[in-house]
Image (cartoon, rainbow, N blue to C red):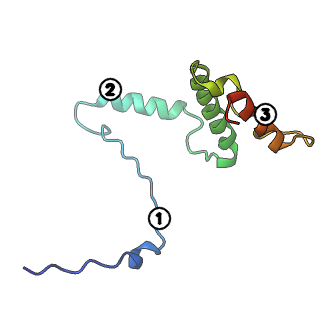
Amino acid sequence: MQLAARPARSSWKNKPFFVTKLRIAVHFSKPGNENVDKLAKVALSKASYLGKLICWSDLKPKVHAYIHTVWQENWDTEGANKLHEVLFYLGEDLHKRGEGADRKREMVMRRLRVGHL
């Protein structure tokens, strides 16, 4: 038995590719789904936002805010974690430091509070 040689990874790895999103309404125009077809047509006629593109830069802050809210809710339920005593709110001083903030001093103080030094 002879096996065919597989193409080297590099031959397909560096080639550009395109992703196409295709949505097919499976229930549309099927016998017995007349009610679903009617409801789908009504929904399409009422939805004014369909066909409008949303820029990622408009959506990105909302996605980040949602993720941060979920993280914070999970963090609030962690009562036994020793780091919870030091940092109550996630992202508290990490991204919005003032000009006078000293990161090294901040980290030493946090490590002292936790007992790492």
- SS assignment at label 3: helix
Say whether marks 3 and 2 touch (CB < 8 Å). no
Q: In this orientation, does residue 93 appear?
A: no
Query: Label 1 amino acid?
Result: Phe
For mark 2, does the 10 Å Cα neighbourhood hold few (<14), some (14 to 19), or many (20 or more) residues? few
Furthest toward the front, the residue is 117
- Quarter location, residue 73: top right
Rendered view: 53 above or below 1: above
> Does residue 88 appear left or right of residue 77 in this picture?
right
- Quarter location, residue 49: top right
Q: Which residue is mark 2?
A: 35
Of the numbered discs 1 and 3, the one sitting upstream in the chain is 1
Q: Looking at the image, is mark 3 or mark 2 nearer the viewer? A: 3
* Inter-mark Cα distance, 2 to 1: 37 Å
Q: Which residue is mark 1?
A: 18
> Does residue 110 appear left or right of residue 27 in this picture?
right
Q: In this orientation, does residue 2 appear?
A: yes
**In front: 25, or 58?**
58
**Percent of width and height locating residue 55:** 66, 48
- Quarter location, residue 79: top right
> Does residue 42 appear left or right of residue 86 in this picture?
left
Query: Label 3 amino acid?
Result: Met
